[in-house]
Image (cartoon, coloured by chain):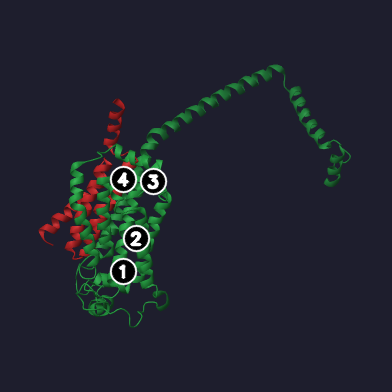
Chain colours: A green, B red
Amino acid sequence: MTNRNDPPKNRFVGWLMGEENPLDDELELIVSTSQQEGRDVLSLEEAERQEEAEELRREKLAIDEKSQSVRIHSWAKHQGAHWLETLYRIAAVVLCGAIIFFLMTTVVALPPFGAENNPYNNEVSQRYIEQGIPETGAVNFVAGMILDYRAFDTFGESTVLFVASCGVIFLLKLNDHSSGKPSRAMLEAEYDDRHHEPKNDGILQFAAKLLTPVILLFGFYIVLNGHLSPGGGFSGGAVMGAGLILYLTAFGFEDTRRFFTYKMTRWISCLPLLCYAGMKSYSFFTGANHIPGGVPLGTPGAILSSGFILPLNICVGFIVMCTMYTFYALFRKGGM
Amino acid sequence: MNAFGMIVLVFLVICAIATSVSKNLLVSVVIFMAYSVLMSIVWMMLESPDLAITEAAVGAGVTSLLFFITLKKIHAIRGDEEEDHHDEQE
């Protein structure tokens, strides 16, 4: 007790040296004295009675608590859940109604379709319509726009497609074609693929035999006439890709590989992108301007006209075709 | 808008609702193909044949094909299971 008011440092040193903490004794002492005092005051009977009363009180409390919790739980289970569900439904309906209201308001506020003084009839479209043919040589304005005025944007889009097909090849390719022999995983995938469908479906094969050349030719026609008629690289490429997919579905890998191998796919998707980059990468340096004295535009309407648009269309078409075919082949069969 | 356009638009809305309401995923995809074909007709009527060709090739063709592959891979086409069962019985 003597060192009770010592600074903490000394006490800490004392504790380190192995002395007992005097505060512990003191605390214990206080507790024990209070207990002893209580015992002195209360007689034994009184203590028993008090204990009984306490027990009764506790039991009552427990019962109360239990009934309360049961009531709350049952409320939450039945009525509360019901309320919550009702609230949820009302909120959903209100939200949907609000979204529909706002969208419909927007649609109603839109200018009428094809009206003369619409906001999109500004100097930009006027310029495209008036100067499009002399400047780009393309009868199809859309092709002139996306492959001449906006050719650099289309280059980015083709790159996105190329990168997407590269990613699919990285992630999903099963076999290594450098050896030339299909690996075990690929054979398993082929078996799994053919197991659940007729291997040699006569109707499908006959239809594919008739339709595939027509579809491929039509796709190539769309690509070649991109600057003359509706269509262009993207739509024509998608049509050609669909034709290849049809042939692959009908005849499987063995027959498709006779004319469209993995190596070819690599070349066909890389070379056009490089060609495109070679033809249009001057935009890095000149911005939106053309190089003066470029390719002659030719007569608008002829197949060999409009400068770079025809080769650019062919490039985009091949890239899109390879991307579509790669997606299908790798997702379906894990190979090519 | 003429009567044909109204009919196409009504069918477009019906297809759009049926795609999301249909319980069977395969049926959903087929209805979605029908939606794409109708949409390409609408593009044609709005005088944008470029978009019509792309919509028909990509929307009705390639997208649906990718959906079919996905359904097949996750065994969501009911015919698959039945065939499996049949094979096991054999």
Foreground disc of the pair 4, 2: 2
Callouts 4 and 2 on one subunit: no
Judging from the image, mark 4 belongs to the subunit labelled B
Q: Residues within 10 Å of mark 4 (few under 14, many from 20)?
A: some
Mark 3 or 1, nearer chain start: 3
Residue A268: which disc? 2
Judging from the image, mark 1 belongs to the subunit labelled A
Give the CA separation, mark 4 to mark 2.
24 Å
Judging from the image, mark 3 belongs to the subunit labelled A
Give the CA separation, mark 3 to mark 1.
35 Å
Q: Residue at label 3?
A: A181
Amino acid beneath label 4: Ile
The answer to whether the residue labelled 3 contacts the one labelled 1, judged by CB atoms less than 8 Å apart, is: no
Judging from the image, mark 2 belongs to the subunit labelled A
In this view, A198 is above or below A177: above
What is the x, y in percent for residue A1?
87, 37
Give the CA separation, mark 3 to mark 4.
25 Å
The answer to whether the residue labelled 4 contacts the one labelled 2, judged by CB atoms less than 8 Å apart, is: no
Mark 1 or 2, nearer chain start: 2
Label 2 element class:
helix
Instruction: Report whether residue A312 is seen.
Output: yes
Callouts 4 and 1 on one subunit: no
Residue A312: which disc? 1
Mark 3 or 2, nearer chain start: 3
